[in-house]
Amino acid sequence: MIPAQFNASEVEKKWYDYWMENNYFHSKPDHRTSYTITIPPPNVTGVLHMGHMLNNTIQDVLIRRARLKGFNACWVPGTDHASIATEAKVVAKLKSEGINKNDLTREEFLKHAWDWTNKYGGTILEQLKQLGCSCDWERTKFTMDADMSASVIHSFVDLYNKGQIYRGYRMVNWDPEAKTTLSDEEVIYEERQGKLFYVKYRIKDSNEFVTVATTRPETIFGDTALCFHPNDERYQHLKGKIAIVPICNREVPIVFDEYIDIEFGTGSLKVTPAHDINDKALGEKHQLEIIDIFNDDATLNSFGLHYQGKDRFVVREEIAKELDDINALEKIENHINKVGTSERTKAVIEPRLSDQWFLRMEDLVKPAIKAVLETKEIKLYPSRFDNTYRHWLENIRDWNISRQLWWGQQIPAYYYGESKEDFVVAENIETALELARIKTQNPQLETRNLKQDEDALDTWFSSWLWPIAVFGGITDPENEDFKYYYPTNDLVTGPDILFFWVARMIIAGYEYTGQKPFSNVYLTGLVRDKQRRKMSKQLGNSPDPLDLITKFGADGVRVGLLLSASAGNDIMFDEELCNNGKAFANKIWNAFRLIKGWEVADIPQPESAKVAIAWYEAKLQQTLVEIEDHFEKYRLSDALMSIYKLVWDDFCSWFLEIIKPGYQQPIDRATFDKAIEMLEANLKLLHPFMPFLTEEIWQHIAERTPEQALIIAEYPKVTSFNAKLIADFDFATEVIAGVRTVRKDKNIPMKEPIDLKVVNNEKVSSYFDCVIMKLGNITSLEYITDKIDGALTYRVNANEYFIPVSGNIDIPAEIAKLTEELVYTQGFLKSVQSKLANEKFVAGAPPQVIANERKKEADSLALIATIEQSLASLQ
């Protein structure tokens, strides 16, 4: 029995379990061509949100289509350990239990982190199953898996030995909330309303003051000089003098440097080398003292005197008041400036000098620039992101790859002495011991004499190896899986991580394999609400994806998202989109039930059915060509729309209507078999987008073995088709629409047969006449050379169609109705033409208004001509 309604929730669980039981998602190397996607790994403790829904639906469409097209499709799922985010959650959990991270050993903390990960990790992957994602779950990877970590450590050691990784004392971006450094790319710059404080510095042994403008008065505790431009006449007399920093009363030198902008502020600069990258350069040049005034949580340390232990923003307000009290504050002005914030924690970044590990990027980046921008070996969709990619990579700086965290791969540097330069780099402590013994020429060294670097590696340094490491290509590049599946084919991700992840994977691909990691990068847009706001928990405008699936079905949600998801463009999400998807699913289900509800008999095939089959086969092929073109250009939304129109308009509204048997009449077997064949072809096209519905219908059509499941069926192949046949049918539909309009306007019931006569000025083929006659309930269709009187008429292009009215309508009443419509239209035309004849109106009105009025004039003239022709034929 075929249920009257499509029950999405029952069907989804049934078929997903079936696909899993039969291992359709699993891939292993064989004779077929591989098609591979690696998932952008979501945070291990994350949950499904709308961006994931869109991104993973697109990936599933690509992988299911590849599977149908005969490729050995492999979609590798996995999660990212997300060092900053996960460590923050674990620290917060411990804090709620009265445990301070600093009171734990690294091993104790990592046990808590693994407990957290094992409890909450992988939830998102289970949620992806509800969406229908056909990942090869047996290949699921986690960036902290032993083999994945081994790849990361191997990569670090390799790059260090090549001279690409080095340790440096640099100005870094410090996140005081996560208490770690960030790379430049992890800092988001925002314009914020702030204040400019004009602070007065006294010149030693005089009553003179110099005013310096600063946005950060709390940093005066780290000032080690005042600086002026050597050509600034206002300050020439200060050469060789000493300034006194207010509050802390530190004596600092006055220096001169062309770096200073004479025109900005007062033309003077307070130099704080520990807390500004430009000040650091000045400090090195003029050999200034470096004073770090902050603790790792951005509270002031002992250099902050009586402000020690207070937060920097609290101090800013309090120090302004103290400066004012001691007459060292000239004024305060409002000032808009750019503030760096942490991409992860949103905390305001603090520039800080620190020993960190860096990766040299200047040479590594060159093959990645060439592959995307020159040889086009890798293509970005849409291509406008090429410019963004170029800007980032051509202005790249060395990558700060160390993080002051415990959750992540620990940097494989081992210290054997007191100096920070006394270290070796090795993949394990045993190898490190050998290297340390050689370096120190001390064979008595033992592992207990070695101390591993406390820092962990940046999460991105792990995930940049993702498409290589998931197949073991870093540690064992000759293994069968890696040689078969790499390079992968397509990457689907958001443009916000084009640099963080995509570009770095490309860099790693060429560095470690000499090959691209993937061929195409499909960049999705952001999912926004109807007001164009980015969806977020804070705004409360992001629906729960699982609730949407419950309400509309997974297929409905997938279609709703994809119909509006053109590459790179943001989606204005509205639940009505999912409702449209659900309605489409119901339309397909009802079409299937209609076909299966027909009685089949061994009777002759009507001519109209033969014609309809020939047309639909051509239309299917034409649409298939469109779909192939859309997929080639990664226009998945357009591909789905082509299928949507084919199924809803061409198949349901026209094909089934033409072949439908008369009331309580059977359908001939040949037509029925073709209808099933066409339905199955439609299901194959739809399956990547609507996997659950299509598999359910497919399995209802006939008894199928696991080898005959839709998920592994053969995708329709492109063949030649008759384009004229399609064009002639389109013309025929306009003829049918004309008949139906006349019937509606003149209240002629559909069950009442009519005659139709044609003046065939267009020389249209009579091939579809049988279809016109069936759908118009036309007794006879006759070609004539002259117009006839006493008939209703309409036109399709140059062709004129006449429906004799004898016995069908009340001619006097129709003449009266047409005459009334003619008089009204002539009056309307007169008012429009009067307006257009008014020179003042034409000269003063906007061009669009004039264009609208001219269109009204043209439409009115055409309508008058049609009414007059109809009246003439009736009189």
Image (spheres, helix red, strand yellow):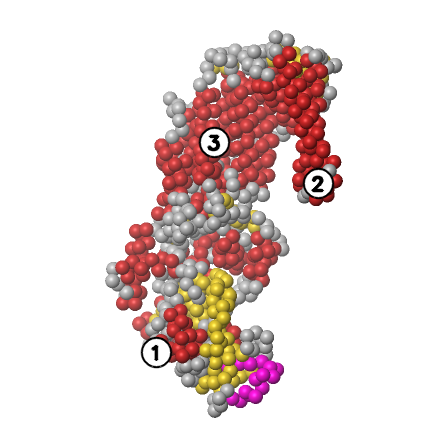
Residue 565 or 688: which is nearer the viewer?
Answer: 565
Hey, what amino acid is under mark 3? Phe
Q: Can you identify the residue that label 2 sits on? A: 841
Residue 223 part of the magenta-drawn span: no
Residue 229 part of the magenta-drawn span: yes
Marks 2 and 3, how far apart at CA: 48 Å
Q: Which residue is drawn at 46% across and 31% down?
A: 583
Give the number of the mark in front: 2 or 3.
Answer: 2
Would residue 839 be visible to someone looking at this image? yes
Structural crowding at the residue carrying mark 2, measured as other residues with C-alpha within 10 Å and reported as few (<14), some (14–19) or many (≥20): few
Q: Which residue is drawn at 60% across and 31% down?
A: 622
Give the number of the mark in front: 2 or 1.
Answer: 2
Instruction: Write down the region rendered in magenta.
Output: 226-241
Q: Can you identify the residue that label 1 sits on? A: 306
* Above or below, comparing residue 479 to residue 309 in the picture: above
Q: Can you identify the residue that label 3 sits on? A: 584
Hey, what amino acid is under mark 2? Phe
Q: Which residue is drawn at 44% across and 74% down?
A: 217
Looking at marks 1 and 3 on the same chain, the residue that comes earlier in the sequence is marked by: 1
